[in-house]
């Protein structure tokens, strides 16, 4: 039995790990609306969410039974067999959720645990069947197949219903309040807010009462029997309170609605999903205790697990504390939350997380065609009125460069919470297996769609993101089932060595995921350098964008150096790294160009000359970004296709050109980052040398072509590389001239011609 006690210890350690990775993924469910709308400082939002989770863990009594008997029938298994199932499940769950967290994709912890239990239980059941005279058809007596089918149907139902409900309610709410909601809030805010709060309050009651450790069965029955009265009285009371607040204070009543909704969803998460993280270890502990009390512990049937187990409130509270701490310190929780917030962002974003796909383009075309047909049917007067109330640009207010502004407003945040609460409450009362992740995500996507956040310039990317997340949900089920089944087979036949091998593999994968996530975070932080935050002055914005350009030029110089080394050594790995960095440079140039467009909106109209000169920075940065990418791509394609290496003389000539361009880039970079005019004599000298070398090397290359020492592919690569270097040098010099024209006041000061 000692070996199984070790298994319990391993399950306990995995439970802590699962709490961490689970909260990191599911935090988006209750943080999305509050963080996206910036209803309060982040620490206030986290305090409220933490309190909600601590309250929710005391309501999770009923859900713990799912891990014990919801997916399989324990009476057909012995304790050692269940230990195989539970170890396989927990090992799979930690690895699977951490993988999703690493790439910032929200998934359902409920679906993952259900299909992991199903996969491991099926694997052990098949082993038992193979060892007995029973046929394959007897598998149904071991497994509760109805539960898995209910989960799958719940996914499909919740995705469609949540998106439609979120879209319709947001459309109606926006039609009522418009984007200039502050004025209309005093007219209809109390009634609308009373409705929202009554739904959220009822949601707290029904979700809490279902699994509470202190609400009696009679109280639960009364709540279910008086649903209408509870909603009515809650509505009247909340509406009166909100109306008083509106009349006698300047408090925005949407803020308490969003914060209360955040508390409610955090509580529901803890009550609903705690079983996903500690339910299996607790079931393993119960199985061990049952076996320990039996005369034949290794063969005794686990029929005792069919009975309800007493809840261990201190243990539940400890789990709640771990979840609350994770919420504060987990960086991956921020990554997952950022994915959903950016998919619903109201404003045009400088870059999108997901690329365009043929499926997303087809869907966007179909929807565009559909709405085009609707517009032809609806009278123009009605369309004009609708557009007037639903156009966000009409109420955009003063232009700023603040990238810390909310991703969407409080009206949409409140709708997200109200609709999600209503749907989850309805699903719970009807005993439908709805996932909080699916409901909250699809409601958020539906409301952003109705709010015209998916404009023509962003729709394909947002749709791709939604498809990626939804596809990930089904992939979760497939991976959970398959990996858990494989782990169960390994553990069953290899026993302790199998567990140790999987633990070793898991530690390696977790470490690798952590490294990948750190790398992705670093890339994000590097891109954040180029974000203009809380800048309302155009001149300061110009100075900042030139400083950003200096940082950009220094990185371009590094990319060109790596690309040349990879070409000279015919090293594909170096060129692969250079190609990756060059793509990053192009994205950085796009970010800076977007910043320049914002800055142009802030510049005073009385200075059109300097504004026009500054606008030329757009084409300069785009040319540099494209040419450095083209140079690296040419080198990579040449080596990757195993073409003949460049001649030593060609490499030497390219090196001389490259060194001059890198010198020019670095000199200009230093000047821009220090906000000074560069040494014009040095820049002019580099340009003159570059011109002379170009003319001389061009003649040399013509001779090599004529005597056929340089074949066609080598000649194309040589001329392409030289061309790109010359364009980068010219545009870098132009950038310095634009900088000096924007800031030089003293005409006697030395300037670049």
Image (cartoon, grey):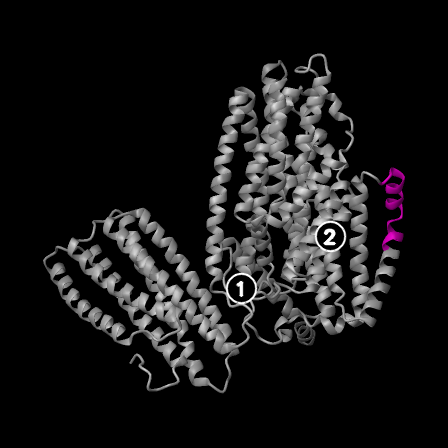
Range covered by the magenta-colored residues: 215-231
Residue 682 % position (x, y): 25, 72
Foreground residue among 378 and 431: 431
Quick one: quadrant of the N terminus? top right
Can residue 410 be spotted in the picture? yes
Task: Name the N-terminal-most of marks 2 and 1.
Answer: 2
Residue 11 % position (x, y): 62, 30
Residue 217 on the magenta segment: yes
State the CA–CA distance, disc 2 to disc 1. 29 Å
Residue 702 % position (x, y): 14, 63
Quarter location, residue 224: top right
For label 2, the crowd category at 10 Å Cα-Cα, with few meaning under 14, some 14 to 19 and many 20 or more, is many
Answer above or below: position of 533 versus 94. below
Name the residue beneath numbered marker 1: 349
| SS label for mark 2 | helix
Residue 356 % position (x, y): 49, 56
């Amino acid at each position: 039995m000692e070996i199984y006690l070790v298994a319990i210890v391993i399950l306990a350690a995995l439970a802590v790990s699962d709490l961490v990775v689970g909260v990191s993924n599911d935090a988006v469910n209750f943080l999305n609306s509050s963080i996206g709308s910036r209803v309060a400082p982040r620490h206030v939002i986290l305090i409220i969410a933490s309190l909600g989770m601590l309250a929710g863990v005391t309501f999770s009594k009923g859900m713990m039974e799912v891990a014990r008997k919801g997916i399989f029938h324990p009476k057909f298994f012995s304790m050692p067999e269940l230990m195989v199932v539970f170890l396989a499940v927990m090992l799979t769950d930690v690895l699977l959720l951490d993988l999703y967290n690493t790439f910032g994709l929200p998934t359902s912890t409920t679906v993952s645990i259900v299909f992991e239990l199903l996969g491991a239980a099926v694997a052990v059941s098949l082993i038992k069947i193979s060892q007995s005279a029973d046929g394959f058809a007897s598998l149904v007596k071991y497994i509760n197949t109805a539960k898995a089918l209910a989960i799958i149907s719940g996914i499909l139902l919740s995705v469609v219903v949540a998106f439609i409900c979120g879209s319709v309610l947001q459309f109606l709410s926006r039609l009522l309040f418009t984007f200039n909601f502050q004025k209309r809030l005093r007219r209809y805010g109390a009634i609308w807010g009373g409705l929202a709060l009554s739904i959220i309050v009822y949601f707290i009651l029904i979700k809490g009462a279902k699994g509470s450790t202190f609400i009696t069965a009679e109280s639960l029955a009364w709540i279910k029997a008086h649903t209408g009265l509870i909603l009515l009285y809650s509505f009247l009371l909340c509406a009166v309170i909100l109306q008083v607040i509106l009349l006698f204070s300047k408090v925005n009543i949407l803020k308490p609605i969003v914060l209360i909704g955040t508390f409610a969803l955090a509580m529901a998460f803890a009550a609903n999903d705690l079983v996903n993280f500690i339910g299996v270890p607790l079931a393993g502990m119960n199985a061990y205790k049952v076996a320990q009390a039996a005369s034949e512990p290794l063969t005794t049937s686990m029929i005792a697990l069919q009975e309800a187990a007493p809840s261990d409130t201190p243990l539940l509270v400890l789990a709640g504390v771990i979840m609350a701490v994770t919420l504060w310190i987990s960086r991956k929780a921020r990554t997952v939350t950022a994915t959903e917030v950016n998919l619903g962002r109201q404003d045009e974003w400088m870059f999108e997380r997901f690329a365009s796909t043929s499926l997303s383009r087809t869907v966007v075309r179909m929807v565009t065609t559909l709405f085009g047909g609707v517009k032809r049917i609806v009278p123009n007067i009605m369309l004009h009125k609708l557009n007037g109330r639903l156009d966000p640009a009409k109420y955009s207010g003063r232009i700023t460069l603040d990238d810390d502004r909310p991703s969407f407003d409080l009206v949409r945040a409140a709708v997200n919470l109200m609709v999600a609460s209503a749907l989850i409450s309805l699903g719970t009362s009807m005993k439908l297996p709805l996932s909080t992740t699916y409901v909250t995500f699809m409601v958020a996507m539906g409301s952003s769609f109705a709010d015209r956040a998916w404009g023509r310039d962003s729709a394909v990317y947002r749709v791709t993101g939604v498809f990626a997340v939804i596809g990930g949900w089904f992939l979760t089920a497939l991976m959970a089932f398959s990996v858990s089944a494989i782990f169960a087979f390994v553990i069953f036949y290899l026993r302790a060595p199998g567990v140790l091998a999987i633990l070793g593999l898991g530690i390696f994968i977790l470490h690798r995921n952590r490294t990948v996530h750190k790398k992705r975070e670093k890339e994000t932080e590097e891109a954040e350098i180029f974000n203009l935050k809380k800048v309302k002055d155009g001149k300061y914005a110009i100075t900042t964008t030139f400083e950003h350009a200096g940082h950009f030029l220094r990185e371009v110089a590094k990319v060109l150096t790596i690309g040349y080394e990879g070409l000279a050594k015919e090293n594909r790995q170096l060129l692969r790294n250079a190609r990756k960095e060059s793509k990053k440079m192009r994205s950085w140039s796009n970010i800076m160009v977007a910043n320049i467009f914002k800055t142009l909106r802030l510049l005073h109209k009385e200075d059109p000359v300097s504004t026009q000169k500054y606008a030329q920075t757009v084409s300069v940065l785009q040319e540099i970004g494209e040419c450095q990418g083209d140079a690296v791509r040419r080198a990579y394609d040449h080596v990757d296709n195993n073409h003949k290496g460049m001649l030593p003389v060609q490499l030497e000539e390219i090196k001389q050109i490259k060194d001059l361009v890198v010198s020019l880039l670095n000199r200009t970079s230093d000047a821009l980052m220090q906000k000074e005019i560069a040494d014009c004599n040095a820049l002019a000298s580099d340009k003159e040398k570059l011109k002379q070398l170009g003319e001389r090397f061009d003649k040399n290359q013509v001779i090599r072509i004529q005597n056929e020492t340089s074949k066609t592919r080598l000649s194309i690569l040589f001329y392409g590389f030289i061309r790109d270097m010359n364009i980068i040098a010219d545009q870098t010099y132009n950038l310095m001239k634009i900088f000096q024209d924007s800031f030089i006041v003293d005409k006697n000061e030395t300037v670049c011609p």
